[in-house]
Image: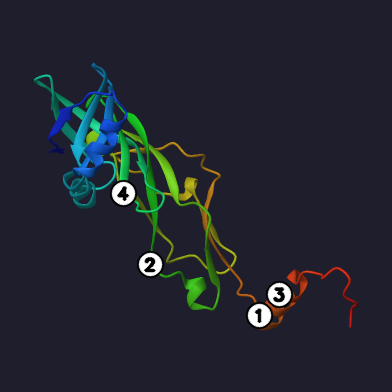
Amino acid sequence: MSVSLEVKERAVRPRSLRNQLRHSGQVPAVVYGYDIESTPISVDQKELTKILRDNGANAVITMTIGGKKINTLVFKAQLDTFTNQMKHIEFLAVNMKETTEVEAEIVLVGESEGVKAGGELAQNLYNVLVSATPDKLPERVEVDITKLVIGDAITVADLPVNKDYDIVTDGEEQIAAVVEAKSATEEESSEDAAEPTVIGEKPE
């Protein structure tokens, strides 16, 4: 399933045109990849934001350029450091019959037995690389942690096989682990050890 996005081809000179587009609610963008030459375009920021919010970051977005329909994925988004608004978008044109690789967010599901017993959950991996045809790409990969006890860990290799996509990330990568909770004494010792030494100050 794909969603449609209206786009407009744009000029690249002068550079001030980019700021003019942004002030009018448009985002300068470029589309390249399968069956299309690199083409500068502009898109409506509110419309694109809604599409990504409703359908996920790996949604297939169909646009019409030069009378031809192009299926794309958002490949890279440049955001403003202060406002978090989109400054520039790169769309990758894809062949719907060929596999492609993208990152999908890892979402931990459930409460582990180890945490219930007083342990602490540590997540070490937040995204995995997945491979699938564009219409099967997941936005997220859910990881069930309910059976993890203190001392247990779950790796990429432990994830169940999914018929829609393959996980490319190294199987030895650790996703999460349940460890023993630090005691108050251990935490105080860690804080004391981390206290900086003031030059010229005599120890008590």
Marks 4, 2: nearer the viewer: 4
Placement of 35 over or under 45, stated as above or below = above
Relative depth, front residue between 2 and 66: 66
Q: Where does label 4 land, which residue?
A: 85
Residue visible at 54% across and 78% down in the picture = 118
Choose the circle earlier in sequence order: 4 or 3.
4
Residue visible at 43% across and 47% down in the picture = 127
**Mark-to-mark CA distance, 1 and 2:** 25 Å
Identity, as a three-letter code, of the amino acid under mark 1: Ser
Q: Where does label 1 land, which residue?
A: 183
**Mark-to-mark CA distance, 4 and 1:** 43 Å
Identity, as a three-letter code, of the amino acid under mark 4: Gln
For label 3, the SS is: helix
Q: Position of residue 50 (x, y in %)?
A: 18, 50
Q: Where does label 2 land, which residue?
A: 110
Relative depth, front residue between 54 and 174: 54
Q: Is residue 176 left or right of residue 134?
A: right
Identity, as a three-letter code, of the amino acid under mark 3: Glu
Q: Where does label 3 land, which residue?
A: 191
Choose the circle earlier in sequence order: 4 or 2.
4
In which quadrant will I find the N terminus? top left
Colour setup of the view = rainbow
Marks 4, 3: nearer the viewer: 4
Marks 1, 2: nearer the viewer: 1
For label 1, the SS is: loop
